[in-house]
Image: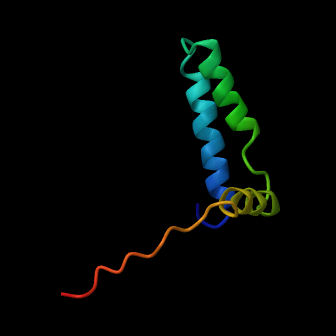
Amino acid sequence: MGPYSEDTQLRRAEAIRHLLSNNPQLDKLTRTMWENKLRNLAKNETEYNWRVRTIYEGLKRGPIIDYGRR
């Protein structure tokens, strides 16, 4: 995940809208999934940063493996 970009979020939203409007054959479950993704896109930088923090703060780093120099 990179830094927040309104342009990126708008491109993501447009891509999902395009997918939904050009694929009427999508089954209900898939359509609902994409509609939820569209609704749940971060609307501003604060919301985006909160989501990034929520995702990554619980991850534990593994041990560092030192392969040494050859």
The colour scheme applied to this rendered structure is rainbow
- Report how many numbered discs are placed on residues in the image: 0
Q: Looking at this view, is 21 or 25 the one in front?
A: 25
Q: In which quarter of the image is the N terminus?
A: bottom right
Residue 41 higher or lower than 36, as above or below: below
Q: In the depicted view, which residue is nearer to us: 37 or 11? A: 37
As drawn, 22 above or below 70: above
Q: Residue at x 58, y 13 (%)?
A: 27
- Look at 75% across and 41% down and name the residue there: 40
Specify whether 69 is left or right of 34.
left
Residue at left offset 68%, top offset 56%: 55
Q: Using the rendered view, name the quadrant where residue 34 is placed.
A: top right
Q: Quadrant of residue 68?
A: bottom left
Residue 33 placed where, x, y %? 65, 27
Look at 67% across and 49% down and name the residue there.
10
Front residue of this view, candidates 7 and 32: 32
Q: With 39 as the anchor, is 65 left or right in this view?
A: left
54 vs 3, left or right, is right
Question: Measured from the top left, where is residue 58 in percent x and y?
Answer: 69, 60
Query: Foreground residue, 28 or 69?
Result: 69
Residue occupying the far left of the picture: 70
